[in-house]
Image (cartoon, rainbow, N blue to C red):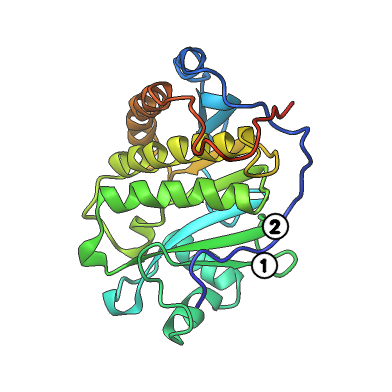
């Protein structure tokens, strides 16, 4: 099975993203979250570098109306039973998730990816990306941080302007990692990876493109904890981006360019 599967999604010309701002300009963006909305669906948005809102939202992976929905999956040997949102997702896709893994054709090794176009009307997203977690006994916050980086990079590669990520750990009967800390780890991986992607664009090493919104999906029981721990994670990741040098990656590479919003 292809690792890091890359299929075409939405395309965008060089009028869709601003070049990475100087390090000194990034810190002010990720300070205060937007106020939670009233009503049945809770959500809290955190500004992050390059104008990317990261929103913790109480919603499931079958419901989000986005370009790219991302979920995780342990390998078959882990024997982690599906529950709640993973049961709903699997059923909505006619048993695809469990069937493709159990067949051995997608083994869900750590950071292995599988990208599909869901059947019309099955789920809200236009595309579904499954990121493997491998053996559940080896799951860690460091792995989830790497998953966050995969999410950001694959979203740019697939030209997905709106992205939703569901950790789906509890929905695979896995409770060894704190839900809020998982959210923080994913964000700490996604923000620097997205910054790198935009630096590549600035150096004419990729076409211009911007993610317009990244949603982190959380169940009602875990929502408050995720919000509480994602907030400082956004600040930490922003600080990391601010400390990066603006020097180009290669002295003999392409000339720099600017991508306009």
Residue 118's disc is: 1
Viewer-proximal residue, 210 or 21? 21
The CA distance from mark 2 to mark 1 is 7 Å
Q: Are marks 2 and 1 in contact (CB under 8 Å)?
A: yes
Q: Is residue 58 above or below residue 8?
A: above
Disc 2 marks which residue?
126
Q: Residue at x 62, y 43 (%)?
A: 205
Query: Which element is circle 1 on?
Result: loop
Residue extending farthest front: 252
Q: Position of residue 58 (x, y in %)?
A: 50, 40
**Crowdedness near tag 1: few (<14), some (14–19) or many (≥20) residues, C-alpha within 10 Å:** some
Q: Position of residue 77 (x, y in %)?
A: 29, 79
Q: Position of residue 8 (x, y in %)?
A: 71, 60
Residue 37 visible in image: no
Q: Position of residue 208 (x, y in %)?
A: 70, 38
Q: Is residue 212 above or below residue 97?
A: above
Viewer-proximal residue, 255 or 91? 255
Q: Residue at x 40, y 52 (%)?
A: 147
**Crowdedness near tag 2: few (<14), some (14–19) or many (≥20) residues, C-alpha within 10 Å:** many
């Amino acid at each position: 099975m292809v690792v890091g599967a890359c299929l075409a999604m939405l395309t965008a010309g060089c009028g869709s993203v601003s070049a990475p701002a100087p390090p000194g300009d990034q810190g002010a963006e990720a300070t205060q979250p937007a106020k939670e909305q009233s009503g049945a669906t809770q959500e809290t948005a955190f500004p992050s570098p390059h104008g990317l809102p990261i929103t913790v939202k109480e919603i499931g992976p079958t419901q989000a109306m986005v370009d790219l929905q991302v979920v995780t999956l342990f390998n078959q040997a882990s024997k982690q039973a599906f529950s709640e949102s993973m049961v709903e997702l699997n059923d909505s896709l006619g048993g695809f998730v469990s069937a493709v893994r159990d067949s051995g054709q997608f083994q869900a090794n750590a950071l292995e990816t599988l990208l599909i176009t869901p059947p019309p009307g099955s789920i809200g997203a236009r595309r579904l990306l499954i990121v493997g977690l491998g053996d559940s006994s080896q799951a860690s916050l460091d792995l989830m941080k790497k998953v966050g980086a995969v999410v950001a990079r694959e979203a740019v590669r697939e030209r997905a302007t709106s992205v939703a990520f569901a950790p789906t750990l509890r929905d695979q009967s896995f409770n060894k990692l704190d839900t809020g800390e998982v959210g923080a780890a994913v964000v700490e991986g996604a923000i620097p990876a997205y910054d790198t992607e935009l630096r590549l664009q600035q150096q004419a090493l990729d076409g211009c493109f911007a993610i317009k919104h990244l949603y982190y999906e959380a169940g009602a029981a875990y929502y408050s904890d995720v919000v509480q721990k994602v907030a400082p994670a956004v600040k930490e990741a922003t600080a990391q981006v601010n400390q990066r040098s603006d020097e180009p990656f290669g002295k003999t590479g392409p000339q720099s360019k600017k991508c306009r919003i």
